[in-house]
Each structure stands twice: as C-alpha cells, then as structure tokens.
Amino acid sequence: MPASKSPLDESARRSPYNMKLHDANLELENITSDINIDLSKGNSTPRNKSKKQLWIIIGIVVLNSIGMSIVLPLLPFIVGKYLPSGQVVVGMSALMSVFAACTFFAAPALGVLSDRYGRKIILIISLLGSVIGYILFGIGGALWILFLGRIVDGLTAGNISTLFAYVSDSTEPKERSKWFGFIGSAMGIGKLGGPALGGLLGSINIALPFYVTAGLIFLSGLAVFFLLPESLVAQKRIKQVTPASFNAFSHFKDIFSLKAIRLLLIPGVFFYAGLGIFQFNFILFLKDIYRWGPAFIGTMLTLVGVFDITTRALLLPWLLKRFNEKSIGIAGLTGMAIGLGLIVASTLIPSVVIISLAIIFIISGSGLFEPTYNGKLSQSIDETKQGKLQGVNQSLQSANNVLIPLVAAVIYFYNPEMLYATAVFMVLAAIMMYGKKFPG
C-alpha cells in the first residue's frame, strides 16, 4: 500500500512559499508555450522564426548559384589568355582539380570549426574566401594568379556543408529532406539564368562576370551577417578544437567508424560517382555521338534545369507526405539507373526521344535521392557533429570531382557505351546497399 501523507507533509505542500513556486512554474510553462520554445532541446530560438531563417538560406543559395554559373561560359576564354588553344582543356582540368583537392582537405576541418564556433562565422569566412578567389580571377595577369584564386576559394569552401549543417540545426529530422530539396532547387534556379547573363557580361568585358560574381557572393555574406542568426546554441557545441581537427583523414576515420553512417556514405559514394559520369561527359557525348551543336545542347541543358527544379521543389515535398524517405530514395536511384541505361541504348538507336527520356529519368531520380539521402545522413548523428559529418560528405564529393573526370575520360576514349554501362552498375550497387542495409 502507498504510504499515507502526514499532516506535516500536507501543510508543507500547501505553504505560501510552495504555492507561489507552483504558480510561477505554471506561468513559465504558459510563456514558453506561447512563444513555442523547446527548452528540452536547449534551443532558445522560437520555432516560428526558423522558417524565415531557412528562406533566407534559400535566397543566399540562389545568389551564390547565379554568381558561380555566370562565370562558367567564360572559363575557357580566361584560361585561353595564358595557354595555347591545345592546352586550354588541360589548364581548366588542373584548375578544377586544385579546387577540389583543397576542398577535400579543408571541408572537414571547417565542419569541425563550425561545430565549435557556430555556423555563422564559418559561413561568412567561406563566402569571403570565394569573393577573394573570384576577384583574383578577374584581376588575372598570370596563370598562377588564377590558381591562387582557386586555392583560396577551395581552402575556404565550407559554404555548402555549413549550410546543410545550419538546416539540420534549424529543422526537425523529418523536415530536413524537404529543405535539402529546396536548397538543390535554389541551385538549379541560379544555374538556369546565370550562363546567359555571364555571356552577356563577358561580351562587354571578359573580367566583368568575375567581379559581378564576387559582388553577389559578398551580398550573400552581408545577408548572413545582418539577417541570419546563429543556429547552433552554445550547449550543443563541441568544447575544444585540437590539431587533429585540421587532419581530414582523422575525420574520415571518426565518421566511418560509426556503422550507421558508414552504411549510408558508401552507397552515397556510388551514387555521386554515377552522377559524376553523367555530369562530366554528357555534353561531350552529345557532341561526339549525336553531332549536335551548341543550340541543341543548350536546349537539353535547359531541360536538365527545369526537371531539377520541379522535382526538388514540387514533386519531392508531395511524395514526402505519402512515402518514407527510404522508398523515395530507392525510387530515385531506380530512375537514375533507367536513365543511364537509356543513354547506353541511344548509342544503338539514336533518338531525341530516348535522350530526352534519359535526361528526365536521371535528373528526376537524382532530385529524389540526393535530398532524402542527405536528410537520412543528418539524422544519423547528433547535433554536436553535424558540421564534421557534412564536411566529410563534401570532402568525399570533392574527391569524386578529382577522380571521376580522369577515370571517365580514359573509359570514354576507349568506349562511350562502356562508360555509361559502368555508371548503371554503380547506381545499381547503390540501390542494393541502400535498400538492404539501411532501415526505412
């Protein structure tokens, strides 16, 4: 039987002091309920403001994407000022590889620094690094200055991983895939109009697009400084940074030692390898196999942008209300495999319809898998290590950007069909690993 309360206990419970304390606790609960604060999670930011912060992030991504896509059509001409025409491709590849290599080593360290000092300061540093890099490109004067610009930009290239960590801080786990999809869609919006604007500005002055890009990214930095609050509260930050924090390989070891994350990252590597083969070789494929000119290839690339935006911004949120993330991810990978298979088929049966369907399947498939994959990835680790995880993930993609073009070029030279068949098998391997070893 439960012990009975003594008159002394009852008297103490009803004392004026305890009654006032009880009333104060009730009042505090009402206040926190009114402003919708979740004290149990140590986050003192009202949730009704988090959506506003996230839309600011989307705007920043659009600005960055427009800026970066503005300069793409001008890169061959800038490099061509310092190299003979036959060596321009080599010079561009070297610039891309230097940037990717710097990002490989820097992104995990920047991720850990954001876990220690917060997302905002690292995001500002990263954006300022890009501003300096593009200004150096605009100044030019020698090939080594172009490489210096890429090195500075690469060593501070933590903006994507920090943005993803910011979204992870500011959303509930089940909302992250949708917002990661919005970020991807924002990148697509920027890429649609940027190249045309770059061509127009470049016709005025070859260096002008690089200065405009630097200006847009600087505006992004100002938006972060003045409009974006810090998302990582002090209670959830790591306590110290050690020399090992600047060793990319130590971060790889830490992250891959966690089984749940390892089971996600490995199929992700296969996915990005398959997607990389498509991205780095498709224009060359259309030029060599179909003999299409710039106008027709440009139309195909517009199709890529349209389906990328609509899949991530419209189709994905609709599907997330009806299916779990794993099912959507597998459907996306399956669509990618079908699209890559259609490219192989198009070498035997040349057809605009087949190529168009291939693009639709590949772009829609990647648009469904990538955000849900990143959403699952962010849910697999606690808040104190989101920066490290996203940094390692960005570093893996940088390694992919260094290796895939080199390997793909060798295979493509031997046999284009074999290259895309290889991409199909990579995506099929991702389906098998993602489907069997990871819960829904």
Image (tube, grey):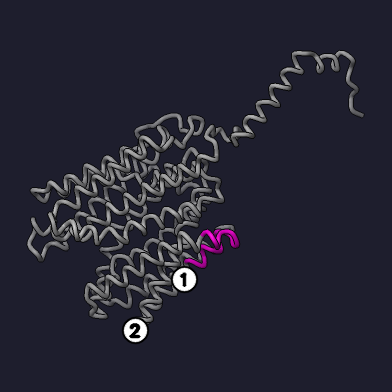
Q: Is residue 193 above or below residue 296?
A: above
Prevailing secondary structure of the magenta residues: helix
Look at the image and say whether residue 329 sits in the magenta stretch. yes
Residue furthest right in the image: 1
Viewer-proximal residue among 25 and 177: 25
Which residue lies under the disc numbered 2?
Answer: 351
Tell me which corner region of the image, top left, top right, bottom left or bottom right, holds residue 307: bottom left
Viewer-proximal residue among 158 and 26: 26
Q: Could you tell me which quadrant the N terminus lies in?
A: top right
Residue 335 is labelled as 1
Point out residue 27 in the picture as x, y percentages from the top left corner: 68, 25
The residue shown at (40%, 64%) is: 308
Point out residue 331 in the picture as x, y percentages from the top left corner: 51, 67
Horizontal side of residue 415 vs 61, given as left or right: left
Other-residue count near label 2 (Cα within 10 Å), few / some / many at <14 / 14–19 / ≥20: some
The residue shown at (27%, 52%) is: 67
Q: Is residue 279 above or below residue 352?
A: above
**What amino acid type should be assigned to the residue bearing mark 1?**
Gly
**What amino acid type should be assigned to the residue bearing mark 2?**
Ser
The residue shown at (38%, 70%) is: 423
